[in-house]
Image: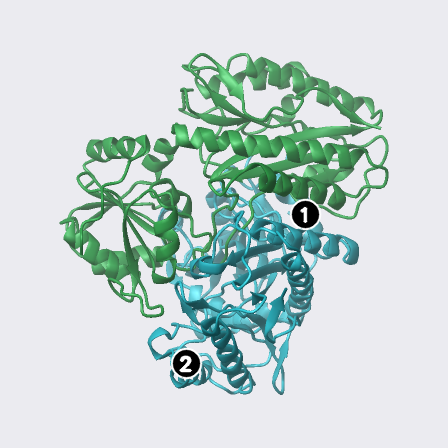
Chain colours: A cyan, B green
Amino acid sequence: MREPPPCQLPPRVERLRALMTDQSIDAIVCLKPENTFYLSGFNPIIYSHPAIVVVTLDHDPILLVFALRGQHARASAWVTDIRLFGTWSDIETLAPDWKEALMIILTSLRASGKTIGLEEGFIPVAQSRNLAEILPQAKFVDVSPFIDQCRLVKDPDEIKNARIAARIADVGMDAAFTALARAGSTERDVAIASTNAMNQYWAENYGDDVEICGFGSLEGGQHNGLAAWVLSGPRKSYACDNPTTRVPEPGETVSVFVWTVANGMHAELERTVCVGPVAEVEQRAIMDILEIRAKVDARMRPGIPVSELYEIAKKGFEAKGYGSIIPGRIGHAIGLGPHENASISATSPVILEPGMILTLEPHILIPDVCGTQFSDTILITETGREYLTRFSRGYLTVN
Amino acid sequence: MREPPPCQLPPRVERLRALMTDQSIDAIVCLKPENTFYLSGFNPIIYSHPAIVVVTLDHDPILLVFALRGQHARASAWVTDIRLFGTWSDIETLAPDWKEALMIILTSLRASGKTIGLEEGFIPVAQSRNLAEILPQAKFVDVSPFIDQCRLVKDPDEIKNARIAARIADVGMDAAFTALARAGSTERDVAIASTNAMNQYWAENYGDDVEICGFGSLEGGQHNGLAAWVLSGPRKSYACDNPTTRVPEPGETVSVFVWTVANGMHAELERTVCVGPVAEVEQRAIMDILEIRAKVDARMRPGIPVSELYEIAKKGFEAKGYGSIIPGRIGHAIGLGPHENASISATSPVILEPGMILTLEPHILIPDVCGTQFSDTILITETGREYLTRFSRGYLTVN
């Protein structure tokens, strides 16, 4: 086969290679949808056939996809070395089966008998057993933690996409707020108004270089990742549920959740809104959480351990009388996953660096008493932090 | 802890128990979102904390969820024995970690040292290693194939939900068709019109007993599973992609894909539509595929091997001059996954039974020449088959 032209590598590939060198890993074989997109630029949306990326120290990343996806991959990946497996139409492929095709690639890279990194936090037992069978000389090691670590600091292309996702989320929250203010709106009405506004905004303001699909699972695909859901009154304690036909009543609070994606990068924007004047316990919870958030926010800058952010929130919960309901975490990394692995928690080893993107979301949640849900998507900059989601962060009321 | 009231078990639990008895499996531990919903009725949508179901022969299925999800689980699962793990607010749980909580449950069921079935087609290597550590006496076996087999024949509640999903898909295709007929509509316009119509139809016609969320992954969630995408002209060969700003031109064909879900059960409805008169090669491909589909359709009834359906399609492709582009499969099982594991292929061992739901979708796809995409969701009945998706199956043109 003719050697493909070399590709323009984003900085993350060099970061990952540095980790590989550190750990004496010769090749990484990625199968997790978020990670294969991260290292190739290709999202087939449907993953019932895997998309696979092979990273080595001395060869451009190689993308291996099902025959049917070849044309799409060539049109959208930044990786230029794309190989095919499977049987479809009259398309020539390396092998009918992805495992066999992968063995051919690793052999040609002289990596088949070396140390191969697998995502053991994702790859199913049966697949890993198959790989061990076809690569009997290889030594396998877990690279899930290294890829997660690599993903913590975002590349410029990722930050650009996160800004777009956040902009769309602002539009979604605005539409939800407007719909909530209309008398008789159900939870579903609010969620649908939000989703439709986000889709329209995307269609009217972005070209074909902005995709809003998410990442699929082994059995399905996420064709549209612009989502909103709504929990009113006592339903706030569910934290996540399909919106219902329930109409929020005057005096209740309503939590609105907006999750978006642009070219794989996610944003999250969540607000609790009062329907007219609300009970004092709810009002106080909102005032308290806004104050706690402001205190944490003031320390968000490079060099600060996220465990310190957690401690600030914890002290705030205790000082305000919520010592018995302190959440286990008050935010998380966000990017190719809406919930990435790193948490803002007491035990996290993460220290803030420019390029990290986190949600800040301590919540006060006492079932049947009160519930607050405020979350923003926040970029750590060279000198501090920047809110990517810009919707009002104050006390919100509709009448 | 007080013993929960016994729950009303759907037939699938007994089918699975029969497979367990056959294979001498004492307990099954499910972690795959589709399967935990299948065996409990609970979909938390977000799976960054796992939802786990334990099935044994002599105890009702047990659902183990993160503390924050307990109230939601109790409100929506048919399983009544719900246990909690994790640290959240002041909620009491079995253990801070799901693995420890699971060990406590399996020990109380006297199953911790016995034969335990895991979904090795799904469970990540790292998780399975953790389980081996906490259950050193257990013997683990792979139950992915048994659960897949169990899922092939749908229960009455699942068929009811698949009908709802199919009804919504019909509405989505109808809206896409109408939007496509409007001059100047882009691929995105058509997809958004379809998605919005489906959401509105759901909101107006179904109560809170019908949810349209899908199943999440380890990092994210699928809050809304009503999806449409559109591939026009040469883009048909991508098979799946985010819709673009491209306006289909007169003389082109356009493939519209609608995927829906109702209470976890999916439907798929796909059509290729001609924009005015099209080139003869495209026209002929559509006529040919409709004829091939009709021939396969005529044999869809209990007792027929799906490999025979594939052979009928294959002969049709050969007879019509498409012998070099025969697809590897012409349909697949559909249910809790839009793409379930069983395929209508040459080598499938599946024999049609009442209650199976399949897509029928042989496609003629020659990049830059022609492409057809017709798919329906079809239930096998006692005497034949029933199209759950009802949109016109003939030659479709907009002007």
A38 to A383, vertically: above or below: above
**Could you tell me the amino acid type at mark 1?**
Asn
Task: Give the labeled residue for mark 1.
Answer: B242
Residue A268: which disc? Answer: none
The reply, left or right, for residue B286 in relation to residue A380 is right
Which secondary structure, mark 1? loop
Residue drawn 36% across the image and 32% down it: B149
Q: Nearer the viewer, residue A235 or B327?
A: A235
Residue A317: which disc? Answer: 2
A182 to B153, vertically: above or below: below
**Could you tell me the amino acid type at mark 2?**
Phe
Q: CB of mark 1 within 8 Å of CB of mark 2?
A: no
Residue at mark 2: chain: A
Q: Position of residue B113 (x, y in %)?
A: 14, 51
Distance from Cα at disc 1 to Cα at disc 2: 44 Å
* Mark 2, other Cα within 10 Å: few <14 / some 14–19 / many ≥20: many
Q: Nearer the viewer, residue B160 or B265?
A: B160
Q: Position of residue A57 (x, y in %)?
A: 54, 66
The reply, left or right, for residue B304 in relation to residue B9 is right
Q: Nearer the viewer, residue A347 or B279?
A: A347
Q: Quadrant of the C terminus of chain A?
A: bottom right
Residue drawn 52% across the image and 48% down it: A244
Q: Position of residue B38 (x, y in %)?
A: 37, 40
* Mark 1, other Cα within 10 Å: few <14 / some 14–19 / many ≥20: many
Toward which corner of the image does residue A397 lie, by quadrant? bottom right
Q: Establish whether labels 1 and 2 are both on one chain.
A: no
Q: Position of residue B181 (x, y in %)?
A: 81, 33
Q: How many marks?
A: 2
Which secondary structure, mark 2? helix
Residue at mark 1: chain: B
The reply, left or right, for residue A377 in relation to residue B113 is right
Q: Nearer the viewer, residue A68 or A259?
A: A259
